[in-house]
């Protein structure tokens, strides 16, 4: 009897955990948000916006869409949760940003806004709508408070350019991936991405708005004399004197010829480039 009771208790616990995991226990809660986005004073049309419920591990998508020709959008969603849901709005844009990702996929700047708790209502249909403060995408809010967390980017538009030649065992290293980044404390910002030519040469440039002088670096990903599953990564910091104000670089930093077969200080292995 005691063994049977223990089994029933375990099964009940598992069922309860599963119900919590799949949103079967809790209160149905909903939220709605609207707003208008502009870029350099003009309506930001076709900008992707997503409404999420923040979770400790993986955020849950509640709704998504794009801004109309006037830069306006409206999203809403609902979720069952034991505690009060924690909704946020993500905005993905290319305003004054020209970064690219691997292949033809484009990268975007992302800004997130936490929606205040007082705009969350019970039920599947929202009873209130949070109207996002009028915002220019280039100025990404950096205000953090208990009710609204906004992040904003300001500063001078700066640019940088770099070129060079890569070799492997003194032969041209073609089709080597190179990335130009702006180094940040948490997550580096991609400015440009290229592959070396048949002769091992490359040239790239990028720009970013920053209050202080940007910290550009070049990452090189290669398999020269390396048979591992991942790739070797070499990082080269670009001197600040090669950073210029404006969208187009006035100078180009030449790294010269680099033989990837050599040993480099700080060289690492990268599986997620």
Image (tube, rainbow, N blue to C red):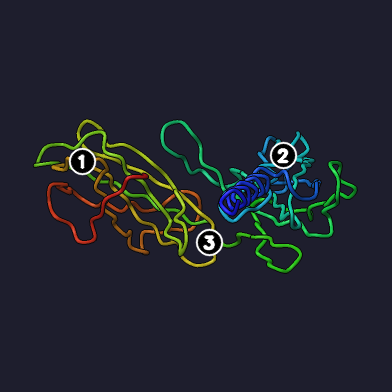
- The numbered mark, 1 or 3, whose residue comes first in the sequence reads 3
Q: Secondary structure at mark 1?
A: loop
| Front one among 49 and 26 | 26
Residue that numbered label 1 is attached to: 223
Give the percent coordinates (x, y) of residue 73. 77, 40
Inter-mark Cα distance, 2 to 3: 32 Å
Inter-mark Cα distance, 1 to 3: 34 Å
Q: Is residue 79 left or right of residue 104?
A: right
Q: Are marks 1 and 3 in contact (CB under 8 Å)?
A: no
| Front one among 211 and 132 | 132
Residue that numbered label 3 is attached to: 210
- The numbered mark, 2 or 3, whose residue comes first in the sequence reads 2
Q: Residues within 10 Å of mark 3 (few under 14, many from 20)?
A: some
From this viewpoint, which residue is outermost toward the right?
127
From this viewpoint, which residue is outermost toward the left?
169
Q: Nearer the viewer, mark 2 or mark 3?
A: 2
Q: Secondary structure at mark 2?
A: strand
Give the percent coordinates (x, y) of residue 25. 74, 48
Relative to 256, does residue 141 appear above or below in the rendering? Answer: below
Q: Secondary structure at mark 3?
A: strand
Inter-mark Cα distance, 1 to 2: 42 Å
**Residue 63: which disc?**
2
- The numbered mark, 1 or 2, whose residue comes first in the sequence reads 2
Point out the image quarter for the C terminus.
Answer: top left
Query: In the image, what residue occupies the spot 79% across and 42% down?
Result: 76
Give the percent coordinates (x, y) of residue 179. 36, 46
Query: In the image, what residue occupies the spot 54% across and 66% down?
Result: 211
Q: Residues within 10 Å of mark 2 (few under 14, many from 20)?
A: some
């Amino acid at each position: 009897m005691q063994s049977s009771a223990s089994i029933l208790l375990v099964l009940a616990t598992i069922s309860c955990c599963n119900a919590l995991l799949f949103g079967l226990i809790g209160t149905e809660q909903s939220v709605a948000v609207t707003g208008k986005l502009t870029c350099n004073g003009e309506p930001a049309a076709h900008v992707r916006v997503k409404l999420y419920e923040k979770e400790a591990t993986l955020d849950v998508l509640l709704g998504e869409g794009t801004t109309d020709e006037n830069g306006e959008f409206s999203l809403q969603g609902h979720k069952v949760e034991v505690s009060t849901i924690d909704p946020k709005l993500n905005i993905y844009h290319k305003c004054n940003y020209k970064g690219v990702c691997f292949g033809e996929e484009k990268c975007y700047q992302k800004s997130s806004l936490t929606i205040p708790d007082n705009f969350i209502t019970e039920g599947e249909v929202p009873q209130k709508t949070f109207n996002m403060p009028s915002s220019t995408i280039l100025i990404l809010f950096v205000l953090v408070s208990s009710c609204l967390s906004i992040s904003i980017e300001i500063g001078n538009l700066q640019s940088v350019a770099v070129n060079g030649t890569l070799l492997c065992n003194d032969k041209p290293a073609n089709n080597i991936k190179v990335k130009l980044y702006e180094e940040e404390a948490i997550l580096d910002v991609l400015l440009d991405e290229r592959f070396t030519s048949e002769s091992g040469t490359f040239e790239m440039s990028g720009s970013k708005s920053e209050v202080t002088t940007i910290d550009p670096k070049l990452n090189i990903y290669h398999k020269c004399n390396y048979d591992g599953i991942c790739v070797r990564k070499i990082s080269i910091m670009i001197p600040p004197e090669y950073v210029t104000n404006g969208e187009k670089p006035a100078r180009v930093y030449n790294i010269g010829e680099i033989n990837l077969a050599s040993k480099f200080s700080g060289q690492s292995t990268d599986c997620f480039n």
